[in-house]
């Protein structure tokens, strides 16, 4: 037997296999014993990790795709082209996993198509459903040239090239709507969501923080791929992106703090509560610290420094989304929610699958384009 | 014109008859010997008859209990769906599984539901429950104000069997007037407030109480606007946003492209001159 053909069992591969096995078991449990057995969800806490992390954070983390697509195609900042395709791929995988997570979390997943024919335009969830479907399609089309190139299919490539700009614009619009509508989901619970997080500006906050996080994701991922696939890192590009991120983050910070001040929510800071701790963590780790670090040119242009900033921004984003969708609702629900291990296993295996798909795509498709063959911005330009 | 229920918590004696009637009507009674019970037989039972309850004491609303009587201090308070005038659940459901009927009840169509549970998350009263234990086709469960009985000209079972008229059924306008009368006639007995008259735009279930409503477990921090407006204000802007956003992005694309072309042309011109 030839053992050379088998992939090497590295530490991370072993970890991934354990996670995927646990995730598979948990999914099986959910579909054979029901949501009650497979989760810690309850009547008081109907939304948990799968919605709070997989869907609400997942969509946000996919924001790099539309941010960069707009940068490259709409603003014609061509030099960002080399990091566009990996961002689109990340966004596509992110959204794909959101759809899979929904199939696991929905009580009746076989009815997932109902929003197509049963309309309720008054429902934010209806808008979210449509945005996920449409944007997933747009992302698939935006990434498809990588697949067509692999199989030398010239016709579809030409066709896609012709519709690139409208496609990108539709994608940016859908993302804008979708990112903000995830915030709008919580506009309807003014009496339930803690004042640190409830604000009439939630849709705006969700959108702006998604843009900042989208940039952080691109930085984070460029670093990881450079390490994993032994590539050169595009430091000047990433530093430029970091500058833009600082501006967006600054705008977000000012709006957020002003809103908290105006609504008088800052008085709660005097209460030593879990909410106060989490709020402080979110603001300090995800906003103030990265902004401070971004001010320094030395940190911004240093590979390690920039990576640390990206990690902080992403952490702050995750804290914010989990606070809005889970912890900020605990005080009014008079209930404590902590995910069951099976919920964690499913979520982790989704993240694992995403890494796996990314690695496979890099191996078999041209994700990191050798040269951006310029011309009029085709998807494969 | 729509039907409502007025619950006077000062009258309730905690006999749980309404709870059993609700279970009978909805086929939720587990104890088998009691299956012969109907709302009629319940009405004819004496006030001290032992009732075949599944669990004693303070039951929480659940998929098997759509109406419960809870003890709050020395007061019994019945909890069930408030049947809002402009219901949050109707507004949030992506597939329109909830409907506010003209007759008053807020009803649920299980065949439309996809189980996203946004209704449970969003309900300001925390009413909708889920069949968590069910693997196949779990449903959202909540009181439907006996809409099928109402269609046959009958009262909701809970009001039918109440031996002390703690819960009465009627037109919302009439019940509001009745509530006002009671407040006026016994001003020292009641908190001078009709809970549900204005909460979240008004509900079809109204409460009277001798103790603050918050002490009964009814949320006291609710706005008087209907909650669906909170999201619809934003949603209704979407068409405008799409058109403006599309125009803006196309404009930026055109300008930056033009600028690029001009720069390119100038560069070539420069080359030609030198």
Image (cartoon, coloured by chain):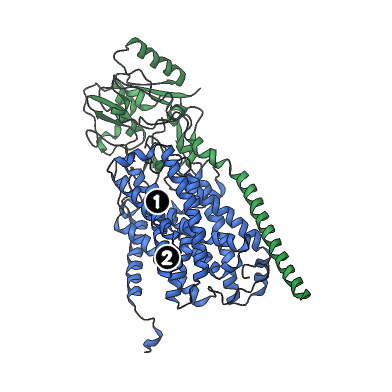
- Secondary structure at numbered mark 1: helix
Query: Where is residue A158 shown, x and y percent of the image?
Result: 68, 70
Tell me, yes or no, whether the two marked residues, 1 and 2, touch with CB atoms within 8 Å: no
Residue sitting at 53 percent across and 69 percent down? Answer: A83
Q: Which residue occupies the extreme bottom position in the image?
A: A1
For residue A320, which numbered disc appears in the image?
Answer: 1
**Is circle 1 on the same chain as circle 2?**
yes
Question: Which residue is at 49% across, 46% downward?
Answer: A203
The tag on residue B46 is none
What is the chain letter for disc 1?
Answer: A
User: Is residue B158 at least partly visible in the picture?
Assistant: yes
Classify residue A227 as left or right of residue A152. Answer: left
Q: Is residue A111 above or below residue B78?
A: below
Question: Looking at this view, is B6 or B247 the one in front?
Answer: B247
In the image: residue B221, left or right of residue B72: right
Location of mark 2 (residue):
A299
| Residue A253 x/y as whole percent | 45, 49
Q: Quadrant of the N terminus of chain A?
A: bottom left
Drawing shade for chain B: green
The local crowd at label 1, few if under 14, some if 14 to 19, many if 20 or more residues have their Cα within 10 Å, is many
The blue one among the chains is A
């Amino acid at each position: 037997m030839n053992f050379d053909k088998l992939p090497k069992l590295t530490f991370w591969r072993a970890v991934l296999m354990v996670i995927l096995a646990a995730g598979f078991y948990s999914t099986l449990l959910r579909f054979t014993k029901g949501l009650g057995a497979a989760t810690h969800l309850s009547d008081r806490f109907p939304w948990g990790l799968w919605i709070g992390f997989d869907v609400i954070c997942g969509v946000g983390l996919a924001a790099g795709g539309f941010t960069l697509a707009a940068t490259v195609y709409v603003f014609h900042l061509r030099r960002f082209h080399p990091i566009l395709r990996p961002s689109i791929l990340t966004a596509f995988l992110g959204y794909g996993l959101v759809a899979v997570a929904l199939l696991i979390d929905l009580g009746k997943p076989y009815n997932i198509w109902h929003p197509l024919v049963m309309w309720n335009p008054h429902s934010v969830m209806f808008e979210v459903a449509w945005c996920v479907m449409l944007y997933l399609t747009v992302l698939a089309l935006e990434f498809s040239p990588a697949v067509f190139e692999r199989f030398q299919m010239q016709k579809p490539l030409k066709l896609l090239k012709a519709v690139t700009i409208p496609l990108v614009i539709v994608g940016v619009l859908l993302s804008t709507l979708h990112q903000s509508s995830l915030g709008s989901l919580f506009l309807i619970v003014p009496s339930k969501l803690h004042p640190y997080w409830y604000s009439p500006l939630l849709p705006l906050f969700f959108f702006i923080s998604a843009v900042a996080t989208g940039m952080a994701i691109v930085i984070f991922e460029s670093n990881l791929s450079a390490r994993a696939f032994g590539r050169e890192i595009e430091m000047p590009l990433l530093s430029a992106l970091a500058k833009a991120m600082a501006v967006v983050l600054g705008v977000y910070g000012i709006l957020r703090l002003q809103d908290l001040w105006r609504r008088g929510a800052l008085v709660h800071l005097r209460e030593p509560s879990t909410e106060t701790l989490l709020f402080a963590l979110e603001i300090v780790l995800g906003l103030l610290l990265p902004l401070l670090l971004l001010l320094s040119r030395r940190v911004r242009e240093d590979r390690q420094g920039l990576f640390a900033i990206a990690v902080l921004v992403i952490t702050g984003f995750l804290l914010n989304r989990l606070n809005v969708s889970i912890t900020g609702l605990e005080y009014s629900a008079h209930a404590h929610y902590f995910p069951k291990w099976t919920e964690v296993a499913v979520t982790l295996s989704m993240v694992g699958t995403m890494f796996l798909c990314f690695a496979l795509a890099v191996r078999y498709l041209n994700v990191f384009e050798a040269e951006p063959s310029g011309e009029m911005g085709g998807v494969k330009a | 014109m729509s039907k409502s229920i007025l619950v006077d918590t000062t009258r309730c004696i905690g006999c749980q008859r309404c709870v059993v009637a609700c279970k009978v009507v909805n086929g939720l009674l587990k104890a088998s010997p009691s299956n012969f019970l109907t709302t009629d037989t319940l009405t004819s039972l004496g006030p001290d008859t032992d009732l075949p309850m599944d669990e004693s004491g303070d039951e929480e609303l659940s998929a098997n209990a759509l109406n419960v009587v809870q003890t709050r201090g020395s007061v019994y308070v019945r909890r069930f769906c408030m049947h809002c005038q402009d219901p949050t659940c109707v507004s949030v459901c992506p597939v329109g599984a909830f409907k506010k009927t003209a007759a008053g009840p807020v009803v649920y169509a299980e065949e439309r539901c996809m189980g996203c549970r946004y209704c449970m998350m969003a309900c300001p009263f925390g009413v909708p429950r889920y069949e968590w234990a069910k693997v196949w086709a779990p449903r959202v469960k909540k009181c439907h104000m006996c809409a099928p009985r109402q269609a046959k000209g009958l009262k909701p079972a809970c009001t039918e069997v109440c031996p002390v008229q703690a819960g009465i059924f009627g037109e919302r306008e009439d019940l509001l007037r009745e509530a006002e009368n009671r407040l006026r006639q016994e001003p020292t007995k009641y908190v001078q407030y009709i809970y549900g008259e204005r909460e979240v735009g008004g509900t079809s279930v109204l409460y009277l109480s001798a103790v603050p409503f918050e002490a009964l477990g009814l949320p006291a921090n609710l706005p008087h606007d209907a909650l669906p407006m909170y999201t619809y204000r934003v949603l209704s802007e979407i068409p405008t946003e799409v058109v403006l956003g599309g125009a803006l992005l196309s404009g930026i694309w055109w300008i930056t492209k033009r600028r690029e072309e001009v720069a390119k042309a100038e560069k070539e011109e420069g080359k030609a001159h030198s």
